[in-house]
Amino acid sequence: MAITYPLSVPTTIGLASVEFRAINAVATSQSPFTYKQQVFVHPGQRWELSASIPPCKRDLAEDWVGFLMSLKGNQGTFLIGDVNSATARGSAGGTPLVKGASQTGGTLLIDGATTSQTGWLKAGDYIQLGTGLGARLHKVLQDADSDGSGDVTLEIWPDLRASPADNATILIADTVGLFRLKSNTQSWQINDVSSYGIQFEAIEVIA
């Protein structure tokens, strides 16, 4: 069977640890005489992550080895999210949709949420826009309430890179983003008791 991207991560054994990093392209210039600073905010924002699987025997490890090698370095893409936050902290009811086209920036207006909910989503919850090669992972920065019409205003990171269509679906559970490996070299370790060690780093795909 031909390899088709994006891949899904193996499920034979889960990750032992994952470190997510939110990277912002912000430059700072400081005077050596007064220590006054100037801050230059550029539009670049992206996710990065480092992950590892638990030490395990070959029958579990080889699925991960095959997965990583199938990505062929920077070429392939895969979907991954924060499994510890697969469900929202907020009530998160209803069928949320993008409310209005041409939205930009770090604020997203949605509708279709359960009406009049305090903390419909809470700080730290995730949303996903798009699927497959169009999947984009965003983190909610502040608690967000729904009004009497089911409208919610979300403050999110990263900013929208493209304006989602009006009534586009918003996923609020089992959210994932699109990533590729950071390196073109993949490696794994095998010790004297035939236990495998596997780590990898990835960066968000930005077209």
Image: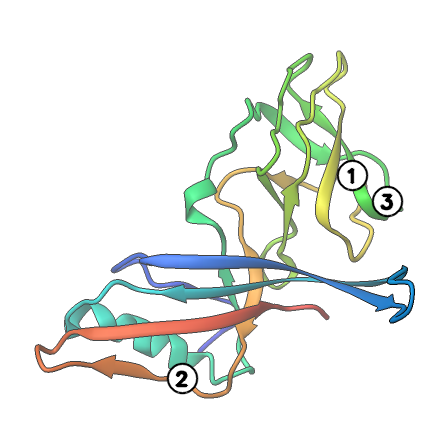
Is 61 placed above or below 23 here? below
Q: Earlier in the sequence, mark 3 or mark 2?
A: 3
Q: Earlier in the sequence, mark 1 or mark 2?
A: 1
Between marks 1 and 2, how big is the CA–CA gap?
A: 38 Å
The dot on residue 41 is none
Between marks 3 and 2, how big is the CA–CA gap?
A: 39 Å
Residue shown at the point (16%, 71%) measured from the top left: 59
x%, y% of residue 131? 60, 54
SS at badge 1: strand
In-image side of 193 versus 173 (left or right):
left
x%, y% of residue 167? 76, 37
Asked if the residue under mark 1 is in contact with the one under mark 3, i.e. CB atoms within 8 Å, the reply is: yes
Asked if the residue under mark 2 is in contact with the one under mark 3, i.e. CB atoms within 8 Å, the reply is: no
Give the labeled residue for mark 2.
186
Quadrant occupied by the C terminus: bottom right
Quadrant occupied by the N terminus: bottom left
Give the labeled residue for mark 1.
108
SS at badge 2: loop
Residue shown at the point (58%, 69%) measured from the top left: 203
Q: Nearer the viewer, residue 32 or 125?
A: 32
Q: Report the colour scheme.
A: rainbow
Of badges 3 and 2, the one in the foreground is 2
Q: Nearer the viewer, residue 79 or 120?
A: 120
- Quarter of the rendering containing residue 42: bottom right
Amino acid bearing label 3: Gln
* Mark 3: few/some/many CA within 10 Å (<14, 14-19, 20+): some
- Quarter of the rendering containing residue 21: bottom right
Amino acid bearing label 1: Leu
Q: Nearer the viewer, residue 27 or 151?
A: 27
Give the labeled residue for mark 3.
103
Is 179 placed above or below 128 here? below
